[in-house]
């Protein structure tokens, strides 16, 4: 047994490993990192972890963030000097996160023989690339220097190859993973006559998640006398504003605020729901969307990030343009009034998640990256 342990691969993993963020949420990067280290990969790998979980989703002071980033960088250099690793795996977001983690990747590439793997996880990284400033140049340089760039979907692979695709073989797709077995037993509701259709929004309550457009669509549905209820499960910088807006617009009887839901509470709220909606402006590969699809729910999402790779329009869900209240309203109304189509979309969605995003499927891809037989 000791010989087996000694022969494990050694991986320095920079990512997010806490149970929840300081504000109580579980972000996509946090879920992905914990899924990897809790999987069967740990039978073949000895992990060295550097946690980079942000204090919250609300911007902290730049001085505070810089101080923490410097401490993490010193920790990274310490591990490089005193420990040998076969691979360095770095999960990275956008903006300041990319400056920090990209620098780690470059340092690792120059001063070690480790294979450097970088995994971008934020939908907002498209802004950094499209702004054509120094950060875009830095992202391009990092992508060219590291050994592997993990792409969350085909859409991201195309974007990254266009930016820095001299060696296209380094851009490898590994879709986000989900513990499908947790969701497959969730029942799809067989609604009785005159029973309300329940719409679920489960995300950060911020403007760029489309929450304001959603409340406007709810107002239009109310005026059409649609029989529905919206559950908002989440918190965020615009939470209080949205609570006030719902009351101001006379929508309190149609909207139920639940705050963050985790664990069994999340499973219960998914079972309680019929439609999932995520009208986000930017996204990577949203976990909440996968969870809803794995639960057999008909889903509405915007044409951003990897969502068009997850939702096949009018097959396993509905795609709409971001910031388009009318499209959001019409899509919700369509699913509210069409039980058979809603159920069929949810059934196809559930099958798709099992085939593409279940943990065993993704872990096989990570095994290939880490040369595990």
Image (tube, rainbow, N blue to C red):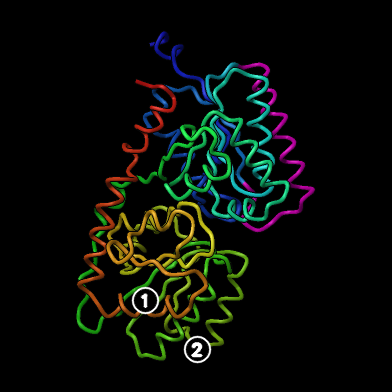
Q: Which quadrant: the C terminus?
A: top left
- Residue span colored magenta: 54-83
Residue 81 percent coordinates (x, y): 68, 18
Q: Residue at x 56, y 41 (%)?
A: 16
Q: Residue at x 45, y 52 (%)?
A: 285
78 part of magenta stretch: yes
Vertical order, 240 against 355 (above or below): below
Predominant SS along the magenta part: helix
Q: Left or right: 42 with respect to 113? A: left
Q: Residue at x 45, y 54 (%)?
A: 286
Q: Which quadrant: the N terminus?
A: top left
64 part of magenta stretch: yes
Residue closest to the eye, 267 or 315: 315
Residue 358 percent coordinates (x, y): 32, 43
Q: Of the numbered discs in the image, which one, if any, rests on residue 332?
A: 1
Give the Cα separation between the discs numbered 1 and 2: 19 Å
Q: How many numbered marks are there?
A: 2
Q: Of the numbered discs in the image, which one, if any, rests on residue 250?
A: 2
Q: Left or right: 25 with respect to 221? A: right
Q: Residues within 10 Å of mark 2 (few under 14, many from 20)?
A: few
Question: Callout 2: helix, strand or loop?
Answer: loop
């Amino acid at each position: 047994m000791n010989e087996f342990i000694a022969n494990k691969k050694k991986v320095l993993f920079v990512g997010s490993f806490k149970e929840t963020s300081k504000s109580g949420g579980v972000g996509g990067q946090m879920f992905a990192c914990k899924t990897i280290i809790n999987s069967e990969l740990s039978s073949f790998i000895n992990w060295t972890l550097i946690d980079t979980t942000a204090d919250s989703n609300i911007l902290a002071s730049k001085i505070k963030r810089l101080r923490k980033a410097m401490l993490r960088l010193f920790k990274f250099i310490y591990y490089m000097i005193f420990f040998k690793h076969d691979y360095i795996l770095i999960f990275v977001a956008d903006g300041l996160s990319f400056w920090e983690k990209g620098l780690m990747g470059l340092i690792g590439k120059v001063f070690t023989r480790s294979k450097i793997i970088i995994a971008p996880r934020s939908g907002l990284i498209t802004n950094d690339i499209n702004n054509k400033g120094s950060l875009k140049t830095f992202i391009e340089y990092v992508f060219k220097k590291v050994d592997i760039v993990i792409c969350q979907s085909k859409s991201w692979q195309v974007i990254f190859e266009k930016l820095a695709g001299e060696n296209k073989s380094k851009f490898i797709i590994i879709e986000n993973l989900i513990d499908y077995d947790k969701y497959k037993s969730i029942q799809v509701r067989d609604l009785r006559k005159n029973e309300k259709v329940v719409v679920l929004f489960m995300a950060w309550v911020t403007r760029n998640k489309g929450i304001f457009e959603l409340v406007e669509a709810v107002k239009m549905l109310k005026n059409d006398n649609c029989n529905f209820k919206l559950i908002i499960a989440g918190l965020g910088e615009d939470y209080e504003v949205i609570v006030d807006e719902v009351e101001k617009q006379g929508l309190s009887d149609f909207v139920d605020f639940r705050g963050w839901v985790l664990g069994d509470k999340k499973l219960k709220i998914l079972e309680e729901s019929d439609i999932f909606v995520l009208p986000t402006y930017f996204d990577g590969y949203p976990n909440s969307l996968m969870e809803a699809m794995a639960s057999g729910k008909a889903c509405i999402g915007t044409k951003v990030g990897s969502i068009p790779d997850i939702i096949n329009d009018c097959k396993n869900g509905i795609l709409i343009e971001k910031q388009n209240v009318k499209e959001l309203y019409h899509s919700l109304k369509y699913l509210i009034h069409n039980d058979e189509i809603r159920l069929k979309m949810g059934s196809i969605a559930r099958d798709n998640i099992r085939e593409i995003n279940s943990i065993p499927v993704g872990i096989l891809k990570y095994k290939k990256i880490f040369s595990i037989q």
